[in-house]
Amino acid sequence: MKVEAGTEDLVQKDRAHLWHSMAKYNEKAAPMIVSEGEGSWFTATDGKKYLDGVSGLWCLNLGHGRQEIAQAAYDQLLNMSYSPLTMSHVPAIELSTKISELLGESYTTYFSNSGSEANEVAFKIARQYHAQNGKPEKYKIISRYRAYHGSTLGALSATAQANRKTKYGPSAPGFLHVPPPYSYRSSFADRANSDLAAADYVEEVINWEDPETVAAFILEPYISGGGVIIPSPEYLTRVAEICRKYDVLLILDEVVSGFGRTGEMFGFMHSKDAQPDIITMAKGLTSGYLPLGATAVRSTIYERFKKQETKAHFRHISTFGGHPAACAVALKSIEILERERIVERVATVSQSILSKLHQLNMLPQVGEVRGIGFLYGIELVEDKETKAPLSDEKVGAILAACKEKGLIIGRNGDTIPGYQNVLIIAPPLSSTEDDLHFLVRTID
Ligand code: PLP
C-alpha cells in the first residue's frame, strides 16, 4: 500500500491503535512508517530512503521487490488457496524434500508460522521422543545465557536474556542455562581456550543434572540477537560430541543463521561432525516474504512417531503452519539463493567487509568487532581496559546518527541489564557492492 509522505492522520491512527513490537513508547518521536521497498532500501513516510542494515528483522535476505517470489505466492493462492497439513499439499511436500536435500541427510519437517513456534515444536518433539523411548523423566532443556529463542512462553523459557523475562512470571519448569562461548567476557579463567571450556561446562551440567533427565540442548550456531557471538568452529563440534555421548538431542536454532546468513547454507556447516538432531528455521526460509517456521527432525527420530497408537502421535496442530503460499514462496526463495550463488558470494564478500570493520578497533569506544558471513557485531565500551559497556544513551545516539545518514542498524537484545552495547549489522544477502560500501562508510 503506497502512502503519502508525512501523513499526520496515519501517525495519529498508529498512536491510537497499533501496538508495536519492543519499541519503547515515545509520544514525541513519530513512528517510522515504511511505505515502499526496493532491493536493500526502503522509503518511509518522512520521504527519506534508508538502507536496511538489519534486513528487517534479519529476514529480508533477498531484499524487496523480487517479482518471481510475489508471482509464486500469487500463482499458488489462485490455484489452491489453503489446505491444512492434516492433509497434504504439493508445495509442502516439495519444500520438506528440499530442506532434507539441503541438510545433506534424511530429515522430516514439521511446519509452523514463526521461529518461536518452530522452537516450541522442537521442545515438544524432544520430550515426546524420549518418553516414547521409555524415558519420560528425560525432559530438561538446556540453553545458553544471552540466547534468544522466541517470545512465546516455552521459547521464552529457553531464552536467557534477563530483561525480556521480567513481568512474565517464572520460566516453564525444566529449562536451565549455561554460559555462552563468549571469549571477550568469558566466564572461564583460561580465555584462550574459553570456547572449549564453555563446551565442556555443558558436559558438567548434564552430569550434575543427571543425564537421564536431560532431553536436549538448544543453541544458535552463532548467537545473533544476543550480541553476535562467534565461537571457533570447534565449539559446536565438541558440543555435538557431548550431546551424542549422553543421548541429549542437539537442537540447532538456525532461525537467523539458516539460508546463507553466515556464508554457508546453514551455520552448523562451518563445524565438523555437528549435524543436528533437530534444526529450526524461519525468517530467511521465505526471505521474509511470508511467515513460515520449520522444525526439521532427523528421520531416525521421526521413526519413533510412526506408530498406530494415538498416544504415540505428535499432538500438535497449526492452522496456518505450512501454508501453501508460504511454502511456494520458500521454494522460490531457495531457488534464487542457489541460482544466483548468493551464499558463496556472502562468504567471499564478507572477508573484505570484516577487514574494514576491524579497522574500527582503533577507536577508544570499540571493544571488539565480530562477524561471520553477513552478520556483524561491534561491541562498544566506555573504556577498553575495564570493558564497561557504553551507556544506553550513547549507543542510542550512534543508532540515531546512522539513521540520520540513511542507514538502519540494530543493537543486541536485553541480555544483561545495562548491556545493550553491541551494534548489530546484518544487511540483505543480495546487497550490491554500492550498498555495502555505503553501509561500511556510514558506520565509519
Ligand atoms: N530464534 C532466533 C535465534 C531469533 O532471532 C528469533 C527472532 O528474532 C526467533 C527464534 C523467533 O522467531 P519469530 O520472531 O519468528 O518467532
Image: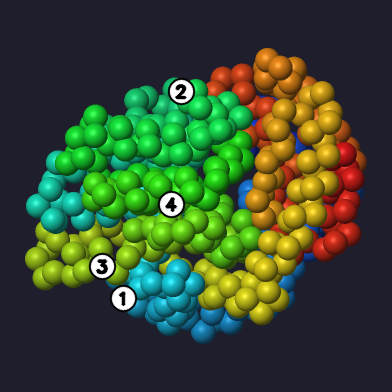
Per the model, the C-alpha gap separating discs 4 and 3 is 21 Å
Q: Earlier in the sequence, mark 4 or mark 2?
A: 2
Q: Earlier in the sequence, mark 1 or mark 2?
A: 1
Q: Which residue is mark 3?
A: 300
Q: Earlier in the sequence, mark 4 or mark 3?
A: 4
Per the model, the C-alpha gap separating discs 1 and 2 is 40 Å
165 relative position to 77: left or right: left
- Measuring from the top left, give residue 229's x and y in whole percent: 58, 40
Q: Which residue is mark 4?
A: 237
306 relative position to 275: left or right: left
Q: For the residues carrying marks 4 and 3, which lies nearer the camera in this image?
A: 4
Per the model, the C-alpha gap separating discs 1 and 4 is 38 Å
Q: Earlier in the sequence, mark 3 or mark 2?
A: 2
Q: Amino acid at mark 1?
A: Met
Q: For the residues carrying marks 3 and 1, which lies nearer the camera in this image?
A: 3
Mark 3 vs ligand 1: CB below 8 Å? no
In the rendered view, would you say 258 is above or below 440?
below
Name which residue lies at 35% across and 78% down: 88
User: Toward the viewer: 269 or 11?
Assistant: 269
Name which residue lies at 31% across and 76% down: 87
Q: Which residue is mark 1?
A: 87
User: Toward the viewer: 80 or 265?
Assistant: 265
**At numbered mark 2, what does the secondary structure look like: helix, strand or loop?**
loop
- Measuring from the top left, give residue 352's x and y in whole percent: 80, 54
Q: Which mark is residue 166?
A: 2
Q: Quadrant of residue 275?
A: bottom left
